[in-house]
Amino acid sequence: MNVTLDQIYAVTGVFLLIFTVLTLTDKKQSGKWGTAAFWGLYGISFIWGKEIPPAVVGGMVVVMALIAGAKWMGTGDYLSATAEFRRKMADKYGMWLFGPALAVPLVTFLVAWLAPKMGALIGLGIGSIVGLVLAFLLTRVMPVQAFQEGRRMLDAVGWAIILSQFLAALGFLFDKAGVGKVVAEMVSAVVPVDVRLATVIAYCVGMALFTMVMGNAFAAFAVITTGIGIPLVVKLHGADPAIAGVIAMLSGYCGTLMTPMAANFNVVPAALLEMSDKNGVIRAQVMTAVPLLIVNICLMYFLAFPGK
């Protein structure tokens, strides 16, 4: 069986369109039309994005941005079970409830290992479907309830759930636009590039700061590595690119821990846990992120320059 990424995207789009239909039929949904339009357009882009002219897709993105900016999205009635019923079911199934969740990474790993041409991303999609099927078999709930809970999560997080996707695309555009060269010129003007430690600090801190702006370490990596990592750390001072690159990426993750732009890591948990402080997750992570960034600087300085 050869599953393609386009097929995984199509399944994701179908789920989003189902959420859209449930939103339209929910009499208690606030911001019904805005919410339905947002998720509907998003679902259409997943299913038919390649067939739709790029200009039209761009227009769809603009409409989604207008809906989010105008705060036309809301929440509804998801027919969720009571807390007492959930506790009863938790006591009944016990640790078996973790089975569907654990199936997702397990299947992802197996697909990436046994079918490397398909890749981990397709494995993640297959694993998610397997986990959903196992959840149905375990709990015996109606499938519509899964869609209701999925819709509840999307509405709780709102537009921010797709922020990482937009930021990754923005990072690609920045790289193509030559932002890396501009970063290199700026760093060279303020950092003594002939001092190895200074370039290492610029690389690691730059990754963290740019990740905080972009909300995505992968997007930041392309720009900062092009502007600082390759010309200064690798070519000028002879760092091992494999070691320096890995540590730089981890430095970017330090920035992920400290920014609301990393919505899937910091905003989503706060929304799902219904925390009163939307930045509570970030506040709890700063005392881990800053020391780890310092450790990364030391690791790169002492490990990425073999024989020097």
Image (cartoon, helix red, strand yellow):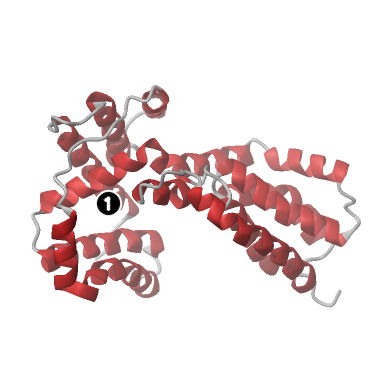
| Residue 46 on image: x %, y % | 31, 41
Q: In the figure, is residue 291 to the left or right of 167?
A: right
Whether residue 216 is visible, yes or no, is yes
Mark 1 neighbour density, 10 Å: few (under 14) some (14–19) many (20 or more): some
Q: Which residue is mark 1?
A: 7
152 relative position to 160: left or right: left
Q: Nearer the viewer, residue 290 or 213?
A: 290
**What is the quadrant of the N terminus in the image?**
bottom left
Instruction: Give the residue displayed 27% in from the left and 51% down from the top.
Output: 7
The residue sitting at 68% across, 38% down in the picture is 178
Relative to 119, residue 226 above or below? above
Residue depicted at 35% across the width and 49% down the height = 272
- Mark 1 secondary-structure assignment: helix
Q: Position of residue 197 (x, y in %)?
A: 84, 61
Using the image, determine if residue 239 lies above or below residue 228: below
From this viewpoint, which residue is outermost toward the bottom? Answer: 307
269 vs 235, nearest the viewer: 269
